[in-house]
Image: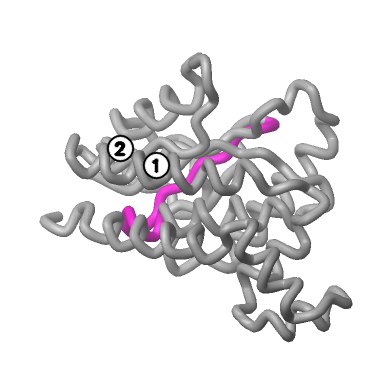
Amino acid sequence: MKYAIFMSDVVGSMRSSHLAVSDSLSQITSLANSTWSNQLLSPLTVTLGDEFQAVARSYRDAMEVCFWIDEASRRAEFPLSLRFSIVYGEISTPINDSIAHGMIGEGLQQARELITKNTRRIIKYQARTGSDAVDQMLNDLLSVAEAITKNWRRKDYALIDSMLRNPSDGEVGSQFGKLRQQIYKRRDTLMISEYQALKRVILKIAGTVGEDR
């Protein structure tokens, strides 16, 4: 049977403090599991020191959780650079609903291959749905979302997080001691609205995957 599988690993973890990476991953996966428990068939589980995986109830859920994790990782005490594979594929063993271990299948193998293969450029999101046409659309849109977030700097993470959560420039400005007009300009420069629009379209397309299941 086919399921929505996602895996992630930390980019450049070998150059970072292993303890800091481990602490941040534990923090993020624990928070994600409590926040998204209804959307997960098998919870986020750290499989190695810098990798984790899970099985979601739907492909849209998997994509939404991945976006949430990426955004939450910037709020961690030690911000992480993550890459994801989101695959709609076969799992041939029963779903382990307590820990994402002990399952096998072609979908899990494909998801792992996507985040471990060596490429000249590290791709943040790689989507596989079983349809070449849908894959092309999703991966094109995801590459644009990646291009936007790649320009976000760590010193702005708190501001970006606030703007993503709150559409009111005035309220965000009050939080950071800035004028509403200043926040409006930063929102425009950082392409916050464009990023959120891309997310909406990506999640809409992701919602069509597995509809004939």
What x and y, as percent, mark residue 91?
29, 38
What x and y, as percent, mark residue 47?
59, 34
Q: Secondary structure at mark 2?
A: strand
Which mark, residue 86?
1
Residue at the image position 64 percent from the left and 78 percent from the top: 166
What x and y, as percent, mark residue 169?
68, 80
Cα–Cα gap, marks 1 and 2 = 6 Å
Residue at the image position 53 percent from the left and 41 percent from the top: 147
Q: In the image, what residue type sits under mark 1?
A: Ile
Depth check, front residue: 19 or 148: 148
Residue at the image position 77 percent from the left and 53 percent from the top: 76
Q: Is residue 54 magenta?
A: yes
Magenta residues span 49-62
Quarter occupied by residue 183 = bottom right
* Residue 170 visible in the displayed image: yes
Depth check, front residue: 62 or 188: 188
In this picture, is 201 found above or below 55? below
What x and y, as percent, mark residue 51?
60, 34
Which mark, residue 128?
2
- The quarter in which the N terminus is drawn is top left
Q: Is residue 137 left or right of residue 32?
A: left
